[in-house]
Amino acid sequence: MSQLSDRAYSLFEEQQKIRGIDVEVVKRKMKSLKIETPSWGYGDSGTRFKVFKKVGVPRDPYEKFEDAAVVNQLTGACPTVAIHIPWDKVENFGALKSHAESLGLKIGAVNPNVFQEDEYMLGSVTNADPEIRRKALNHLIECVDIMKEVGSDILSLWFADGTNYPGQGHIRQRKQWLQEALDQTYKKLTPEMRMLIEYKFFEPGFYHTDLADWGMSFNAASKLGPQAEVLVDTGHHAQGTNVEHIVAYLLDEGKLGGFHFNSRKYADDDLIVGTTNPYELFLIFYQILDALAYGDDRARRSAENIAYMIDQSHSIEPKIPAMIRSVLNIQTQYAKALLINHEELQEAQRKNDVLGAEHAIRSAYEIDVTPLLVSIREEQGIPHDPMRAYLDSDYSKKIEARGVGGSSW
Amino acid sequence: MSQLSDRAYSLFEEQQKIRGIDVEVVKRKMKSLKIETPSWGYGDSGTRFKVFKKVGVPRDPYEKFEDAAVVNQLTGACPTVAIHIPWDKVENFGALKSHAESLGLKIGAVNPNVFQEDEYMLGSVTNADPEIRRKALNHLIECVDIMKEVGSDILSLWFADGTNYPGQGHIRQRKQWLQEALDQTYKKLTPEMRMLIEYKFFEPGFYHTDLADWGMSFNAASKLGPQAEVLVDTGHHAQGTNVEHIVAYLLDEGKLGGFHFNSRKYADDDLIVGTTNPYELFLIFYQILDALAYGDDRARRSAENIAYMIDQSHSIEPKIPAMIRSVLNIQTQYAKALLINHEELQEAQRKNDVLGAEHAIRSAYEIDVTPLLVSIREEQGIPHDPMRAYLDSDYSKKIEARGVGGSSW
Amino acid sequence: MSQLSDRAYSLFEEQQKIRGIDVEVVKRKMKSLKIETPSWGYGDSGTRFKVFKKVGVPRDPYEKFEDAAVVNQLTGACPTVAIHIPWDKVENFGALKSHAESLGLKIGAVNPNVFQEDEYMLGSVTNADPEIRRKALNHLIECVDIMKEVGSDILSLWFADGTNYPGQGHIRQRKQWLQEALDQTYKKLTPEMRMLIEYKFFEPGFYHTDLADWGMSFNAASKLGPQAEVLVDTGHHAQGTNVEHIVAYLLDEGKLGGFHFNSRKYADDDLIVGTTNPYELFLIFYQILDALAYGDDRARRSAENIAYMIDQSHSIEPKIPAMIRSVLNIQTQYAKALLINHEELQEAQRKNDVLGAEHAIRSAYEIDVTPLLVSIREEQGIPHDPMRAYLDSDYSKKIEARGVGGSSW
Amino acid sequence: MSQLSDRAYSLFEEQQKIRGIDVEVVKRKMKSLKIETPSWGYGDSGTRFKVFKKVGVPRDPYEKFEDAAVVNQLTGACPTVAIHIPWDKVENFGALKSHAESLGLKIGAVNPNVFQEDEYMLGSVTNADPEIRRKALNHLIECVDIMKEVGSDILSLWFADGTNYPGQGHIRQRKQWLQEALDQTYKKLTPEMRMLIEYKFFEPGFYHTDLADWGMSFNAASKLGPQAEVLVDTGHHAQGTNVEHIVAYLLDEGKLGGFHFNSRKYADDDLIVGTTNPYELFLIFYQILDALAYGDDRARRSAENIAYMIDQSHSIEPKIPAMIRSVLNIQTQYAKALLINHEELQEAQRKNDVLGAEHAIRSAYEIDVTPLLVSIREEQGIPHDPMRAYLDSDYSKKIEARGVGGSSW
């Protein structure tokens, strides 16, 4: 480290000591934070108005893994990659797995896609047509098979199912069909597999979404059994929703399976996580760290097994830099949350000291964690500034040879 | 009936026959619709900026029941009245009960109040102070005792508990305290009693509400047992929330206990039900009628036992007319929902005929049900136009003698 | 008319007479209501997740006009069709114009498109790159030329310009660039042309939209001059926004140019107008009719010249039926609004009779206007039920020959 | 300063030098930031459910100024205090002014109150009753007279005027009445006075607010003349509204008069500023600083004359600490915004470098400004930690003698 950053770090360390924070513990926890990047985050995506095609976008799943490997090398934090079927369908999944491993990666969550084939226009597992429901179920089960092939232990389920108009679908009937499909799929899981059930407030259904909120996913998962849990996509809530409350609630119930991280101001904007309201991300991590430290067995186990996954649509951003920034943003807020002094906070809570408790939270948030992150990267042997390192790298030039016209999604 | 309304009714009847609707069945169902009015809806209430005091507002619980009796006489639909403790606390609940009965009324839901005493500023059953939690619990149990005295079978629970700032309260701990209080209270219920658990998105808590959405109330109720159900206040949701979806969902789970009806455009505006988006109210009734007709045992039983209650804050309206209008609005939308041809609708749903299904719903909504309602009132021996009848009545003048300065809430 | 509908109509007429409504006046006003359908509403469109391709979708602008002609014939209300450039760009606009006229149609608003070419990814008229701004401006001016060729008098402007991240763009600078482009374009208008300036709360910009609300469009239009006015897209507002208030406001300022009608529950859902909250549409028409009857010269002229245009995305619906339904929904709410007794309403307003005024509005809304609409269609020589007529027509079969793969948008 | 904070400051200074920031300039700007606290922020306030009364709340306007003086002494930033009439109405305004001055304070904005007298239930300057409109206007003019007596140069106008139901009021007529009242009041202003016109999305009007958004206030102010400007209350917008966009827009128009700072997650929550989404506050200051540095004359002058005012409802917080925290939060975000490197940012904007521009903004936000603020306070001779200093002060004990039952609002 440079002399300046040395001084910054040693000052940081002393300040934290005074605050009662053990920096070595913080570092250890930081190093164990792993974030899964999605294969589709490296491809072109856009809005309904236009998908702008970029130079250098990977042309197949293999190239997506190569990009993901670069992100992992530069951040040291992204050893797994989520795949989407059929976007990442290949002849030979064993070969894809080997390719990943040769790059230092593993395949993470498998995401079935039951919303892009023509039959699914009016629903997949909740379609009124039993043939379509069957087709969708078969695809879910196919994905469990793929999980076995690629060594994945997470089935990550998002359904676009919903309706656009009152009366269009029979809501209770659809609810039951959905549960049946989940049930059939759940039975196919091997014991080490988990099924994460995502919910979404709206879009593409503009009247109702069959799994519209955490309560519906939670209830569905509860009926299935211990291997089913809820997946929280940070952008899938109504305006004003207190997402960290939901996180705390699910942890307390032992049912928080993972996150799809992204950022939003309006709808499901799918922007880079931590760019709209970074404080919210910090508060989510506060709830998780609290459950890890003070939760009962159920809450703690749930917190320990959270799958931290990014799910964004990089409509205008260069893909690899967007992913690096996302990882850095998560690390920043996680680091800040690790600096909360829980004893001080809980003391204020016990005394009903509103301003004291709020201050205990926010004073951690206001700390600049750059010295900490640089020190950790130094210890990990990765660049102090992964973004700068990427922009200066040969890789960022090399991929230009791919030209325009890579994978959408 | 006048000649014109006779013709209108006979035309209505013929038209419905052609549509496949049996008007006699509709009438029978309409007559059995009972709506509970709240004692506090007859008192003065307002916004945080001002409670405007009105002439003629009842000065005690006894006068509130007198007003409620007028609403019941004119509409034929409001035989029960919800009470709020301590707003309606009287020396002798037996006397209040007798008073109600002498007016043709019964006491409906009992609503504990654990938000207006100084101790509750930072929470009642979730307060960090165990003494305050105990006090709140005792009040809940006191209300169960009052239920026995007044012959009520519904304990209607709303908690103002929540926080204003991140960190102010320990969310998971508060969740557990809440469940403990519910659990202790539930144990006091006699077998014929039900506990309805309300949720609210925000206010007075502006960071988090301990029971923030249907999922939290539902989960709490599920843990308690069959006598606990969810209470849906139509104004307690995030913007855009599909309330009828929640209604359908809870019915399918057999856990919809009742409604607090009111209307909102922004927050918990507590306006007269059916004035902001009357179509939403109609769609709620569609889901209920569908569950009654096509639900499994659990859904049907839940639908049959729904407690339809009004909960509004008449900040600027004369109280009794506001209540009459509320009842009429509910009747109007309920009547329209009874005109849905479910066979036609379900046929369109089965065929994935989006526009056909939407049309089946909305064409019922567009029907003018005035002839039907007038005919029913004729048969019930009540005024064709209850509002007009009230405005022309002596009662509306008589209460002026009460002067200004009646009960707040 | 059948005997039943004869009776329904004569009853309707008598009832309205009693209410003080002159049905002949209502009919005349109904007949003069013209609604412009958009060429792109006949093409395939969808969400960012998928554009589902339909059988029978028009393959070129000429076929779009053929479909639009059918809608006009069946409803008698849609003699003009909006076009989008370059979606509807043809070699010979004169030929397109003649084609339209041969079908009994005229070309309505011309809509430039400055959001789908690669250069526009980060903005068109507000792009930081002056070359791109110039290109966008040239397209706007090109569209004014096309207006001359096709005989259009409305330039309908929507800009997708905005940013996704704080700092991405220089907001004030972009505001100035936008005004400059509008100014340059405005200067090209001939005296009989109008420029309508649309605003949008968000999407595709997810941090800010350069023209985000009515205030920004209004201010831009005010600076330009009398030929510039505001275009209200009913789906382009924040949750809870009182759209009819904005309508009334703009009318009072003489600056309401037109509507893009559609329906939304969440974001810019672009569903069939009148399906989510039909009451809102009715209330919009109430404000317009009030301005027509009681406005000063400026307000009245503005109300008289409103361009009623549909702008929807029929993602799952068959296109022509979706358009017919849209027109019928508009007619229904317009008809109801025509039944408001303004004297009664204003009397209640003057007396601060809150419930009386609300009732004056809503009692008109509750009237079933089917007899009126049927009677008008009878007089116009068009089918009583345009939707039924279409579904039974040969045309609905004939277009199947077009196969799958028609125009997107 | 202690040795540790010395080191922290010198490190901060070096780091900023490298970033191209002149810390001396930053300090100078920080010292000139003045924030007005509101007299009513020291009194009891609450929600519609309850106003919890606190020990030590000032019992009259004189005591409110004493509390405000303590906030000013400890923060060095709050030399003016806004007053509300009639809440702060005293026999002798000259005496109040002298009292303020003896405490080192001046009277800031004068806020008329036309919403708490019985006549105003259905509106003040937009009431259908001309007598009530006149009364309200007289009060506005009375407040201009009070301004003269107390030496205030800002008339701060918020109207609760609005309606709860469709049809209740005649929207265009009310718009005109409002403008007339503003016009009459404007004419009474002396040349050095400014009129700031606040808007609000909703509450207490739950159907429409006569001045609902910035566009309506802006248009009203534009018609009045240069002494009328818009007042932005940060909590008065629809969910999702980009407030900093509005700030930038108004600055560019030279019409941003001032702020009412507070924080909100849901409605107009009136919480301590900077506690819900501190990043938003930072982004507001970015726009202001940009206008100061790069705006044209009009924008710069508007930015220079912004009245920074706090307007909060401390329902559960101790009042003086809540105010101190509010001031500190504003200072923190203002300081961070002063650390933005505008050249770097604008370079990225010019190059359409999305991630670079976003990073230029957010990297300033992530800096811990504590060393800077401590250094400034050291230079100003005020406590390094004003909150700690207050909690340890005698004053915080002394006011307990006031007991419970001080002023509401």
Image (spheres, coloured by chain):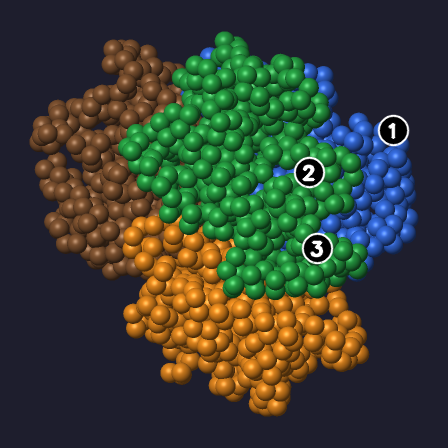
Chain colours: A blue, B green, C orange, D brown
Frontmost of labels 3 and 1 is 3
- Label placed on residue B22: 3
- The alpha-carbon separation of the residues under discs 3 and 1 comes to 55 Å
- Label placed on residue C293: none
Please tell me whether mark 3 sits on a helix, a strand or a loop.
Answer: loop
The residue tagged 1 is A191
- The alpha-carbon separation of the residues under discs 1 and 2 comes to 39 Å
Q: Nearer the N terminus, badge 3 or badge 2? A: 3
**Does residue B328 sit above or below C51 in this rendering?**
above
Frontmost of labels 3 and 2 is 3
Frontmost of labels 1 and 2 is 2
> Residue A353, how many percent across, how many down?
44, 17
Q: Where does the C terminus of chain B fall, quadrant-wise?
A: top left
- Label placed on residue B303: 2
> Residue B166, how many percent across, how many down?
50, 27
Are the two marked residues, 3 and 1, in contact with CB atoms closer than 8 angstroms? Answer: no
Q: Is residue A115 left or right of residue D341?
A: right
- What residue type is disc 1 on? Pro
